[in-house]
Image: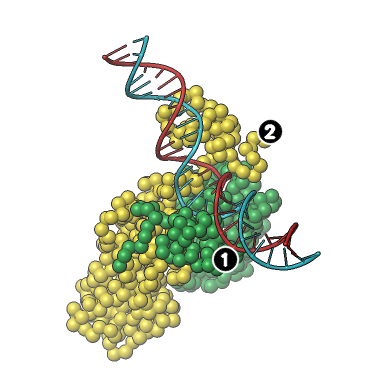
Chain colours: A green, B yellow, C red, D cyan
Amino acid sequence: MQEKPRARKGRRPTMVDVAREAGVALRTVSRVVNDDATVGAELVERVRSAIAALDYRPDERARHLRLGVTGTLGAAVRQLSHVNPVLRAVERAARAAGLMVLAASTEDDEKIERHVVESMCRRRFDGILLEPIGADHGYLVPELAAGLSLVAVDRPVLGLEVDCVLSDNVAGIETAFAHLVAHGHRRIAYIGDDERIYTAQERATAFRACLRAQGGAADAMIHTGPIQRERIHRALESALSGPSPATAVITGNATLSVETVRWFRDHADDVAIVGFDDSELATLLRPDLTVVAQDDAAIGDTAITMLRTRIAEPATPVRKVTVPVTLRARGSGETTPKRP
Amino acid sequence: MQEKPRARKGRRPTMVDVAREAGVALRTVSRVVNDDATVGAELVERVRSAIAALDYRPDERARHLRLGVTGTLGAAVRQLSHVNPVLRAVERAARAAGLMVLAASTEDDEKIERHVVESMCRRRFDGILLEPIGADHGYLVPELAAGLSLVAVDRPVLGLEVDCVLSDNVAGIETAFAHLVAHGHRRIAYIGDDERIYTAQERATAFRACLRAQGGAADAMIHTGPIQRERIHRALESALSGPSPATAVITGNATLSVETVRWFRDHADDVAIVGFDDSELATLLRPDLTVVAQDDAAIGDTAITMLRTRIAEPATPVRKVTVPVTLRARGSGETTPKRP
DNA sequence: GCCGATTGAGATAACGTTATCCCGATACCG
DNA sequence: CGGTATCGGGATAACGTTATCTCAATCGGC
């Protein structure tokens, strides 16, 4: 079978080649490719035949340059390799809007975050969703001044006026605390993340407020720090020993829940637990894990809506949207105090 | 504070603007930006001052068009929202090579897969990693003919001569089977995925071969189908009942392991299990889950290496790399038969 | 039959970079 | 001192699309 004609060896056919093959002007080919109704039927047919003959396929790099719009949103997330249900909602909402989301991970590293975000800026993506890390986002200042459309997800970009969508951390902790109190618990411990992280600080601060409202001493029941198994296990040992051991634990995220449950199975079997955020394993344990669940779909949808608004109307005032969370009682948070 | 001068309202400054500001030619600005050593120090300084004054930032869309290289690799994966440790290795290997990986998910949907891959082709990404779904990849034929560099990960693109890197499914199943036999098990069941999926078929076929080698009837002990909790639980009920119930189970992937363990906790407590692929929860259960672990880092590194080779030397013969797996004995696969 | 409006199509510039080619000045060698 | 080579910098084209503007032909109305 005869090889299809190529415009030039090693180079893919362009509209110029299609125009030559069809015997029309370049502009005519562009009109046909873009379904411009002002081209006569005969020319349309000739162009389509040439497109098929040359196996022409559009090059959006040129189109992006000419139009100044790429139809692409970047998503700079902390970990692509981990579970990230918000991304599903983000991709679906973008696809519904005819946009493509391209994700890269920042690996919880500030240098990589800057590298990833600046790479996306250099590619002139139409907008960026960022799951921010760390405190210093100075590198964003000139990009925002130059017109970057960005929405922070899950935590704000501290120090900068940027759109943000996140869960209601405070209400989540309050709900968890009230739930345990309603089941008779009076000595409740908190196992949280490093408070330099925004959500960790919000959740820890909310927990302290709960303790103070209860009339209790605040800090002895709160254990925050990096997510390391040993640190978490030491915290649990401390919280659940001594003259007034905790009878219930609230954890600050799914990984902390995992490590807490791991410790429980060897060291404690009658401690109630309510964990922040849901995950697959929450229904694998005995009893099932009671959780404060974030509304990933709402976060994702809202993030895309806010980003599209920012792109379309850059003068829109900066917004911070807080998405409600939900307590899912599955058993582990409904037991009553059993320790002395 | 005086606003920084803008080349034109609403448009970002370009090299043309920098050239005007610095009083040099456009080409000179390009030379400076690209660290061309042939520009005199005085002109370099003037250009850099103009860059700072205008807050110029390079636009890689134009560069990509002119050079025909984007420095970007697309990763079309089944689910971004789920755990995907291979992606971590992919991103790290790409970063080390000065490339950016941008990922999108195909959501296990053939139409979405085609849409995502064709979008990446239209953007002329330098290469694509694909976690293929389904059987029909005809849409790739013209792209491959036109020079698309693509590596399939985790399963081959059936019917097309395309580079592929995947785990040694056969050896994994054989190892798991031999492990259970070594611990005295003679009636071993297999809970697998839908055999239309390549890896599922490979694993199921390997399991059948193990059964035949053992001299047993093949199909009664094999249960494959879609990953649905009810189907899996019915399969387990069937496998573990009757006159010759299985005393051990091998599962075909991490999700099947999850569902099998979920059923076990309510219905069976003395059945050995070896699961294909590792996950976080494997060490949360009692006993810990014995697994056949895939080498995610090796898969990711190999995928990037193969893709870069394909990009750099398109005439390279197509390769299929099989990455060894490892059995991790953690307890659940080491018990001896206990059922009658 | 003529004039004005509309339509279908084409010529060329634009987007913002980099490559190619060229020019003028300077330095070195014979 | 003259000729040739090299170097620093500039002019312009190229990449592949779409936008803008223009032109010619046709049609309808007076």
Front-lying residue, B210 or B101: B101
What amino acid does circle 2 point to? Gln
Front-lying residue, B296 or B111: B111
Q: CA distance from mark 2 to mark 1?
A: 55 Å
Q: Is residue B236 above or below residue B33?
A: below
Residue sitting at x 45%, y 45%: B66
Q: Visible in this render: residue A122?
A: yes
What amino acid does circle 1 point to? Gly
- Whether labels 2 and 1 share one chain: no
Front-lying residue, A108 or C26: C26
Residue sitting at x 43%, y 65%: A52
Q: Considering the numbered disc 2 on the image, is that residue within a helix, a strand or a loop?
A: loop
Give neighbour class at mark 2: few <14, some 14-19, many 20+ (Cα, 10 Å). Answer: few
Left-right relation of D19 to B298 = right
Left-right relation of D1 to A241 = left
Q: Is residue A110 above or below residue A262?
A: above
Q: Quadrant of residue A199?
A: bottom right
The image shows residue B284 at horizontal and vertical percentages of 40, 65
Residue tagged by mark 2?
Answer: B2
Query: Which quadrant of the figure contains the C terminus of chain B?
Result: bottom left
Query: Which quadrant of the figure contains the N terminus of chain B?
Result: top right
Q: Which numbered marker is on residue A122?
A: none
Q: Which numbered marker is on residue A40?
A: 1
The image shows residue B131 at horizontal and vertical percentages of 38, 64
Q: Chain of mark 1?
A: A
The image shows residue A89 at horizontal and vertical percentages of 54, 64
Q: Visible in this render: residue B264?
A: no
Give neighbour class at mark 1: few <14, some 14-19, many 20+ (Cα, 10 Å). Answer: few
Residue sitting at x 30%, y 67%: A1
Closer to the eye: label 2 or 1: 1
Front-lying residue, A84 or B258: A84
